[in-house]
Image: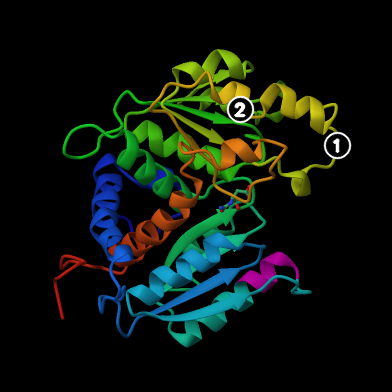
Amino acid sequence: MKRHLLSAADLSRDDAELVLRTAAELRELADRPIKKLPALRGRTVVNLFFEDSTRTRISFEAAAKRLSADVINFAAKGSSLSKGESLKDTALTLEAMGADAVVVRHGASGAPHRLAHSGWVRSSVVNAGDGTHEHPTQALLDAFTMSRHLGTGPKGSLDGRRVAIVGDVLHSRVARSNALLLNTLGAEVTLVAPPTLFPVGVESWPVEISYDLDAVIPKADAVMMLRVQRERMSGGFFPTAREYSRRYGLDGRRMATLQDHTIVMHPGPMVRGMEITADVADADRSVIVEQVTNGVAVRMAVLYLLLGGSEPAVGGEE
Ligand code: NCD
Protein backbone atom coordinates (compact mmCIF):
# COMPACT_ATOMS: atom_id res chain seq x y z
CA MET A 1 0.00 0.00 0.00
CA LYS A 2 1.12 3.56 -0.66
CA ARG A 3 1.24 6.00 2.27
CA HIS A 4 -1.86 7.89 1.13
CA LEU A 5 -5.19 6.81 -0.37
CA LEU A 6 -6.08 9.61 -2.76
CA SER A 7 -7.46 7.77 -5.76
CA ALA A 8 -8.80 4.31 -6.48
CA ALA A 9 -5.97 4.21 -9.03
CA ASP A 10 -3.49 4.18 -6.12
CA LEU A 11 -4.54 0.60 -5.45
CA SER A 12 -3.02 -2.31 -7.32
CA ARG A 13 -5.13 -5.45 -7.51
CA ASP A 14 -3.08 -6.93 -4.64
CA ASP A 15 -3.60 -3.79 -2.53
CA ALA A 16 -7.34 -3.75 -3.18
CA GLU A 17 -7.66 -7.45 -2.37
CA LEU A 18 -5.68 -6.93 0.84
CA VAL A 19 -8.08 -4.16 1.91
CA LEU A 20 -11.10 -6.33 1.10
CA ARG A 21 -9.67 -9.34 2.92
CA THR A 22 -8.78 -7.26 5.99
CA ALA A 23 -12.24 -5.68 5.91
CA ALA A 24 -13.81 -9.14 5.83
CA GLU A 25 -11.98 -10.06 9.06
CA LEU A 26 -12.98 -6.78 10.66
CA ARG A 27 -16.56 -7.09 9.45
CA GLU A 28 -17.06 -10.02 11.81
CA LEU A 29 -16.61 -7.58 14.67
CA ALA A 30 -19.73 -5.66 13.70
CA ASP A 31 -21.78 -8.66 14.82
CA ARG A 32 -20.06 -9.03 18.20
CA PRO A 33 -21.26 -7.25 21.34
CA ILE A 34 -17.83 -5.68 21.93
CA LYS A 35 -16.74 -4.04 18.70
CA LYS A 36 -13.44 -2.56 19.77
CA LEU A 37 -9.84 -3.61 18.98
CA PRO A 38 -6.63 -2.07 20.36
CA ALA A 39 -4.84 -1.95 16.97
CA LEU A 40 -4.50 1.86 16.69
CA ARG A 41 -4.23 2.71 20.38
CA GLY A 42 -2.24 5.93 20.82
CA ARG A 43 -2.66 7.01 17.19
CA THR A 44 -4.60 10.12 16.19
CA VAL A 45 -7.02 10.28 13.27
CA VAL A 46 -8.35 13.68 12.22
CA ASN A 47 -11.57 13.97 10.25
CA LEU A 48 -11.28 17.16 8.25
CA PHE A 49 -14.57 17.85 6.52
CA PHE A 50 -14.92 21.02 4.44
CA GLU A 51 -18.15 19.72 2.88
CA ASP A 52 -21.38 18.31 4.28
CA SER A 53 -21.41 14.64 5.04
CA THR A 54 -23.43 12.31 7.19
CA ARG A 55 -22.51 8.73 6.59
CA THR A 56 -18.91 9.13 5.44
CA ARG A 57 -17.86 11.23 8.42
CA ILE A 58 -19.66 9.06 10.94
CA SER A 59 -18.30 5.95 9.26
CA PHE A 60 -14.67 7.11 9.51
CA GLU A 61 -15.26 8.18 13.10
CA ALA A 62 -16.72 4.79 14.03
CA ALA A 63 -13.90 3.01 12.16
CA ALA A 64 -11.13 4.91 13.96
CA LYS A 65 -12.82 4.50 17.36
CA ARG A 66 -13.31 0.77 16.90
CA LEU A 67 -9.56 0.52 16.39
CA SER A 68 -9.01 2.54 19.61
CA ALA A 69 -7.50 5.58 17.85
CA ASP A 70 -8.07 9.07 19.22
CA VAL A 71 -10.41 10.93 16.87
CA ILE A 72 -10.57 14.67 16.29
CA ASN A 73 -13.45 15.96 14.20
CA PHE A 74 -12.69 19.18 12.42
CA ALA A 75 -15.69 20.59 10.55
CA ALA A 76 -14.03 23.30 8.53
CA LYS A 77 -17.06 24.26 6.49
CA GLY A 78 -17.90 27.93 6.67
CA SER A 79 -14.34 29.18 6.98
CA SER A 80 -14.02 32.69 5.58
CA LEU A 81 -10.49 32.11 4.39
CA SER A 82 -9.90 31.33 0.74
CA LYS A 83 -9.62 27.61 0.10
CA GLY A 84 -5.85 27.46 -0.43
CA GLU A 85 -5.08 29.43 2.70
CA SER A 86 -7.55 27.66 4.88
CA LEU A 87 -6.29 24.27 3.77
CA LYS A 88 -2.69 25.21 4.50
CA ASP A 89 -3.44 26.83 7.85
CA THR A 90 -5.58 23.93 8.90
CA ALA A 91 -2.90 21.48 7.81
CA LEU A 92 -0.30 23.24 9.92
CA THR A 93 -2.62 23.04 12.92
CA LEU A 94 -3.13 19.32 12.37
CA GLU A 95 0.58 18.78 12.07
CA ALA A 96 1.10 20.62 15.34
CA MET A 97 -1.42 18.28 16.97
CA GLY A 98 0.45 15.22 15.79
CA ALA A 99 -2.15 13.64 13.51
CA ASP A 100 -1.18 10.20 12.17
CA ALA A 101 -3.93 10.16 9.56
CA VAL A 102 -6.02 12.94 8.07
CA VAL A 103 -9.31 12.00 6.46
CA VAL A 104 -10.28 14.88 4.22
CA ARG A 105 -13.40 15.82 2.31
CA HIS A 106 -13.24 19.00 0.27
CA GLY A 107 -15.37 20.69 -2.38
CA ALA A 108 -12.35 21.25 -4.61
CA SER A 109 -11.13 18.34 -6.74
CA GLY A 110 -7.48 17.72 -5.90
CA ALA A 111 -7.49 19.19 -2.36
CA PRO A 112 -6.39 15.89 -0.71
CA HIS A 113 -3.53 15.59 -3.24
CA ARG A 114 -2.44 19.10 -2.31
CA LEU A 115 -2.49 18.18 1.36
CA ALA A 116 -0.58 14.95 0.79
CA HIS A 117 2.09 16.35 -1.49
CA SER A 118 2.56 19.88 -0.14
CA GLY A 119 4.91 18.88 2.65
CA TRP A 120 2.56 20.59 5.16
CA VAL A 121 1.77 17.36 6.98
CA ARG A 122 3.62 14.13 7.65
CA SER A 123 0.47 12.07 8.21
CA SER A 124 -1.26 9.67 5.83
CA VAL A 125 -4.00 11.40 3.86
CA VAL A 126 -7.23 9.61 3.00
CA ASN A 127 -9.49 11.16 0.39
CA ALA A 128 -13.09 11.05 1.68
CA GLY A 129 -14.44 12.80 -1.41
CA ASP A 130 -12.90 15.69 -3.36
CA GLY A 131 -15.21 17.77 -5.53
CA THR A 132 -16.41 15.75 -8.49
CA HIS A 133 -13.17 13.80 -8.61
CA GLU A 134 -12.79 10.71 -6.37
CA HIS A 135 -14.07 8.88 -3.32
CA PRO A 136 -11.91 5.77 -3.08
CA THR A 137 -13.21 4.34 0.21
CA GLN A 138 -16.75 4.44 -1.19
CA ALA A 139 -15.56 2.37 -4.14
CA LEU A 140 -13.87 -0.07 -1.76
CA LEU A 141 -17.01 -0.51 0.31
CA ASP A 142 -19.05 -0.96 -2.85
CA ALA A 143 -16.63 -3.60 -4.15
CA PHE A 144 -16.69 -5.28 -0.73
CA THR A 145 -20.49 -5.38 -0.77
CA MET A 146 -20.54 -6.75 -4.32
CA SER A 147 -17.96 -9.36 -3.45
CA ARG A 148 -20.08 -10.63 -0.54
CA HIS A 149 -23.14 -11.04 -2.77
CA LEU A 150 -21.70 -11.81 -6.18
CA GLY A 151 -18.11 -12.89 -5.63
CA THR A 152 -16.91 -16.26 -6.85
CA GLY A 153 -14.18 -18.54 -5.50
CA PRO A 154 -12.50 -18.30 -2.10
CA LYS A 155 -11.44 -14.69 -2.72
CA GLY A 156 -14.95 -13.52 -3.68
CA SER A 157 -13.65 -12.50 -7.09
CA LEU A 158 -15.57 -9.99 -9.19
CA ASP A 159 -13.91 -11.13 -12.43
CA GLY A 160 -16.39 -10.81 -15.28
CA ARG A 161 -19.21 -9.48 -13.10
CA ARG A 162 -21.25 -6.77 -14.80
CA VAL A 163 -21.94 -3.55 -12.95
CA ALA A 164 -24.21 -0.76 -14.24
CA ILE A 165 -23.60 2.68 -12.69
CA VAL A 166 -26.55 4.91 -13.47
CA GLY A 167 -27.28 8.62 -13.26
CA ASP A 168 -25.34 11.80 -12.62
CA VAL A 169 -21.91 10.50 -13.61
CA LEU A 170 -20.77 14.04 -14.42
CA HIS A 171 -20.81 15.20 -10.79
CA SER A 172 -20.06 11.85 -9.18
CA ARG A 173 -16.76 11.09 -7.50
CA VAL A 174 -18.32 7.74 -6.57
CA ALA A 175 -18.69 6.78 -10.24
CA ARG A 176 -15.10 7.60 -11.15
CA SER A 177 -13.59 5.76 -8.18
CA ASN A 178 -15.84 2.76 -8.80
CA ALA A 179 -15.00 2.65 -12.51
CA LEU A 180 -11.28 2.55 -11.70
CA LEU A 181 -11.44 0.08 -8.81
CA LEU A 182 -13.93 -2.31 -10.39
CA ASN A 183 -11.79 -2.43 -13.50
CA THR A 184 -8.75 -3.25 -11.34
CA LEU A 185 -10.78 -6.06 -9.77
CA GLY A 186 -11.81 -7.51 -13.13
CA ALA A 187 -15.45 -6.43 -13.28
CA GLU A 188 -17.09 -4.95 -16.38
CA VAL A 189 -18.60 -1.52 -15.82
CA THR A 190 -21.24 0.19 -17.94
CA LEU A 191 -22.10 3.80 -17.16
CA VAL A 192 -25.65 4.83 -18.02
CA ALA A 193 -26.70 8.49 -18.13
CA PRO A 194 -28.21 11.10 -20.41
CA PRO A 195 -25.56 12.57 -22.76
CA THR A 196 -25.50 15.80 -20.71
CA LEU A 197 -24.43 13.97 -17.54
CA PHE A 198 -21.26 12.32 -18.82
CA PRO A 199 -17.97 14.12 -18.10
CA VAL A 200 -15.61 15.23 -20.84
CA GLY A 201 -12.98 12.53 -21.29
CA VAL A 202 -15.18 9.62 -20.19
CA GLU A 203 -13.98 7.80 -23.34
CA SER A 204 -10.68 7.24 -21.60
CA TRP A 205 -12.27 5.56 -18.56
CA PRO A 206 -12.13 1.75 -18.53
CA VAL A 207 -15.91 1.42 -19.06
CA GLU A 208 -18.68 1.06 -21.64
CA ILE A 209 -21.14 3.90 -21.88
CA SER A 210 -24.83 3.79 -22.70
CA TYR A 211 -27.83 6.14 -22.81
CA ASP A 212 -30.33 3.29 -22.61
CA LEU A 213 -31.08 2.02 -19.11
CA ASP A 214 -33.59 -0.63 -20.22
CA ALA A 215 -31.03 -2.21 -22.54
CA VAL A 216 -28.31 -2.43 -19.87
CA ILE A 217 -29.87 -3.49 -16.58
CA PRO A 218 -31.24 -6.95 -17.52
CA LYS A 219 -27.61 -8.06 -18.07
CA ALA A 220 -26.18 -6.47 -14.92
CA ASP A 221 -25.23 -8.32 -11.73
CA ALA A 222 -25.26 -5.07 -9.74
CA VAL A 223 -27.09 -1.83 -10.48
CA MET A 224 -25.71 1.22 -8.71
CA MET A 225 -27.92 4.30 -8.75
CA LEU A 226 -26.37 7.75 -8.31
CA ARG A 227 -27.97 10.81 -6.76
CA VAL A 228 -28.66 13.74 -9.08
CA GLN A 229 -26.36 16.33 -7.49
CA ARG A 230 -28.41 19.45 -7.87
CA GLU A 231 -26.11 21.43 -5.57
CA ARG A 232 -23.36 21.09 -8.18
CA MET A 233 -25.61 22.00 -11.14
CA SER A 234 -25.90 25.50 -12.47
CA GLY A 235 -27.80 24.94 -15.69
CA GLY A 236 -30.46 22.59 -16.99
CA PHE A 237 -28.99 19.15 -17.55
CA PHE A 238 -32.36 17.53 -18.27
CA PRO A 239 -35.83 18.88 -19.11
CA THR A 240 -37.69 18.05 -15.86
CA ALA A 241 -37.27 15.83 -12.81
CA ARG A 242 -40.18 13.76 -14.03
CA GLU A 243 -38.60 13.22 -17.41
CA TYR A 244 -35.30 12.25 -15.74
CA SER A 245 -37.02 9.69 -13.50
CA ARG A 246 -38.94 8.25 -16.42
CA ARG A 247 -35.79 7.61 -18.47
CA TYR A 248 -33.09 7.07 -15.84
CA GLY A 249 -34.86 6.25 -12.58
CA LEU A 250 -35.10 2.75 -11.14
CA ASP A 251 -38.73 1.90 -10.39
CA GLY A 252 -40.62 -1.33 -9.72
CA ARG A 253 -41.33 -1.94 -13.37
CA ARG A 254 -37.66 -1.74 -14.30
CA MET A 255 -36.61 -3.73 -11.25
CA ALA A 256 -38.77 -6.59 -12.57
CA THR A 257 -36.40 -6.87 -15.56
CA LEU A 258 -33.36 -7.62 -13.36
CA GLN A 259 -31.97 -11.13 -12.92
CA ASP A 260 -32.89 -12.86 -9.66
CA HIS A 261 -29.43 -12.49 -8.14
CA THR A 262 -28.92 -8.85 -9.15
CA ILE A 263 -28.39 -6.39 -6.30
CA VAL A 264 -29.40 -2.72 -6.17
CA MET A 265 -26.96 -0.26 -4.64
CA HIS A 266 -26.83 3.47 -3.84
CA PRO A 267 -24.05 5.37 -2.03
CA GLY A 268 -26.59 7.63 -0.32
CA PRO A 269 -28.01 10.10 0.28
CA MET A 270 -30.93 8.92 -1.86
CA VAL A 271 -33.53 11.17 -3.36
CA ARG A 272 -36.47 8.80 -3.21
CA GLY A 273 -38.78 9.37 -6.15
CA MET A 274 -36.02 10.86 -8.30
CA GLU A 275 -33.32 8.31 -9.20
CA ILE A 276 -34.91 5.46 -7.22
CA THR A 277 -38.45 4.78 -6.03
CA ALA A 278 -39.15 3.95 -2.40
CA ASP A 279 -40.29 0.39 -3.19
CA VAL A 280 -36.99 -0.33 -4.96
CA ALA A 281 -34.90 1.30 -2.20
CA ASP A 282 -36.61 -0.94 0.36
CA ALA A 283 -36.75 -4.11 -1.76
CA ASP A 284 -35.09 -7.36 -0.64
CA ARG A 285 -32.45 -7.06 -3.37
CA SER A 286 -31.47 -3.57 -2.18
CA VAL A 287 -28.19 -3.66 -0.21
CA ILE A 288 -28.13 0.07 0.52
CA VAL A 289 -28.21 -0.25 4.32
CA GLU A 290 -25.63 -3.02 4.23
CA GLN A 291 -23.32 -0.71 2.24
CA VAL A 292 -23.28 1.60 5.27
CA THR A 293 -22.40 -1.24 7.67
CA ASN A 294 -19.69 -2.48 5.33
CA GLY A 295 -18.31 1.05 5.06
CA VAL A 296 -17.14 0.96 8.68
CA ALA A 297 -15.24 -2.32 8.20
CA VAL A 298 -13.65 -1.10 4.98
CA ARG A 299 -12.54 2.18 6.55
CA MET A 300 -11.15 0.29 9.54
CA ALA A 301 -9.12 -1.80 7.10
CA VAL A 302 -7.86 1.28 5.25
CA LEU A 303 -6.83 3.13 8.42
CA TYR A 304 -5.24 0.01 9.84
CA LEU A 305 -3.23 -0.73 6.70
CA LEU A 306 -2.17 2.89 6.08
CA LEU A 307 -1.04 3.34 9.65
CA GLY A 308 1.32 0.47 9.23
CA GLY A 309 -0.57 -2.53 10.55
CA SER A 310 1.73 -5.50 10.09
CA GLU A 311 0.13 -7.82 12.66
CA PRO A 312 -3.19 -9.42 11.72
CA ALA A 313 -5.86 -6.80 12.50
CA VAL A 314 -8.00 -9.24 14.44
CA GLY A 315 -6.57 -11.40 17.19
CA GLY A 316 -3.01 -10.14 16.74
CA GLU A 317 -2.73 -8.39 20.09
CA GLU A 318 -4.68 -8.19 23.28
C1 NCD B 1 -21.61 10.51 -2.09
C2 NCD B 1 -20.62 11.64 -2.03
O1 NCD B 1 -20.62 12.43 -1.10
O2 NCD B 1 -19.83 11.68 -2.95
N1 NCD B 1 -22.14 10.11 -0.88
C3 NCD B 1 -21.41 9.44 0.05
O3 NCD B 1 -20.23 9.67 0.26
N2 NCD B 1 -22.04 8.43 0.70
C4 NCD B 1 -22.60 10.67 -3.16
C5 NCD B 1 -23.57 11.82 -3.13
O4 NCD B 1 -23.40 12.81 -2.42
O5 NCD B 1 -24.56 11.71 -3.86
Q: Residue at x 48, y 86 (%)?
A: 97
Within the magenta stretch, is there residue 86?
A: yes
Vertical comparison of 219 with 105: above or below: above
| Residue that badge 1 annotates | 235
Which label is found at residue 295? Answer: none
Give the class, few, some or many, for how many residues have Cα within 10 Å of label 1's Cα (few <14, many ≥20). few
User: The disc labelled 2 sits on which kind of residue?
Assistant: Gly
Q: Residue at x 64, y 46 (%)?
A: 270
The answer to whether residue 202 is visible is yes
Observer-nearest of 42 and 316: 316
**Are the residues at dot 2 and dot 1 in contact (C-beta closer than 8 Å)?**
no
Residue 79 found in image quarter: bottom right
Residue 252 disc label: 2
Which of label 2 and label 1 is nearer to you? 2
Q: Secondary structure at mark 1?
A: loop
**Magenta-highlighted residues:** 82-87
On whether ligand 1 comes within 8 Å of the CB at mark 2, the answer is no
Dominant SS of magenta comes to helix
Query: SS at mark 2?
Result: helix
Q: Residue at x 66, y 73 (%)?
A: 76
What is the spatial separation of the Cα atoms under label 2 and label 1, in whole angstroms? 30 Å
Q: Position of residue 288 (x, y in %)?
A: 50, 46
Q: Is residue 48 left or right of residue 271?
A: left
| 249 over 288 or under it: above or below | above
Mark 2 crowd level (few <14, some 14–19, many ≥20, 10 Å Cα)? some
Q: How many marks?
A: 2
